[in-house]
Amino acid sequence: MKVNEVFEGIQGEGRYVGHPVLFVRVSNCNLNCSFCDTEFITGRIYSVEDLTKEINRSKMDTVVWTGGEPTLQLDEIVEVVDRTPMEHHHLESNGYRLDSKLNAFSYLCFSPKNLKDARRIKEFGEGDIKIVTDLELNKELIPYATMLMPLSTFTQRDLEIERNVWNYCIKNNIRYSPRIHVNLWGNDRGK
């Protein structure tokens, strides 16, 4: 399996914001979003056994599988999940692959990038649907959201976007997801 990076950090977004976790950022994605803030092309090839050993060395009780798009390598990831004693395995996905193997995870967070996938995920009925937006980008996906996360542009515009999304969430009774890692570290990797 191809993995971009493995690191311990704090979950900076979503339902479990603030929790110490082990991130496994896999390489490769089925999409090429212009607003993506993640470098996921490069990576190291791991065997299931080698990645299992690396995860088992961590003191964290939660592993967050993110990417890229983890479901492109779902079969191998599930093998690793089955071999690790961690209490929780979370999956962050764009919703590319929805099937029963997702039951291996204690939490699912989907961030669809188009209307077709948002509808499929809503019908799937599991996990959160997190929409990245400035209230213009992905506007058509907002009705499917269980949480909204402000788009980060890494410019002075970000505070305005955060406040606008915050106010929209209050007005529409939707969970707001901060991006505390971005607020603290900008676009530094491995944080």
Image: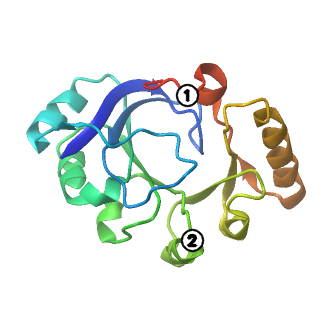
The residue positioned 57% from the left and 58% from the top of the image is 128
The residue positioned 38% from the left and 70% from the top of the image is 98
Q: Is residue 54 left or right of residue 183?
A: left
Residue 171 in percent (x, y) is at 90, 56
Which label sits on residue 118?
Answer: 2
Gap between marks 1 and 2, in whole Å?
Answer: 27 Å
Q: Nearer the viewer, residue 91 or 163?
A: 163
Q: Which of 41 and 191 is in front in this view?
A: 41
Bin the neighbour count of mark 1 within 10 Å (Cα to Cα): few under 14, some 14-19, many 20 and up: some
Q: Is residue 169 left or right of residue 28?
A: right
The three-letter code of the residue at mark 1 reads Asn
The residue positioned 57% from the left and 73% from the top of the image is 122
Q: In this view, does 137 lie to the left or right of 36?
A: right
N-terminal-most mark, 1 or 2:
2
The three-letter code of the residue at mark 2 reads Ala
Q: Name the residue under label 1.
A: 187
Q: Assign a secondary structure to mark 1.
A: loop
Residue 21 in percent (x, y) is at 43, 30
Q: Is residue 107 left or right of residue 137?
A: left
Q: Nearer the viewer, residue 61 or 48?
A: 48
Residue 73 in percent (x, y) is at 25, 56
Residue 51 in percent (x, y) is at 18, 36
Q: Assign a secondary structure to mark 2.
A: helix
Bin the neighbour count of mark 2 within 10 Å (Cα to Cα): few under 14, some 14-19, many 20 and up: many
**Name of the residue lying farthest toward the front:** 34
Q: Height in image: 1 above or below 129?
A: above
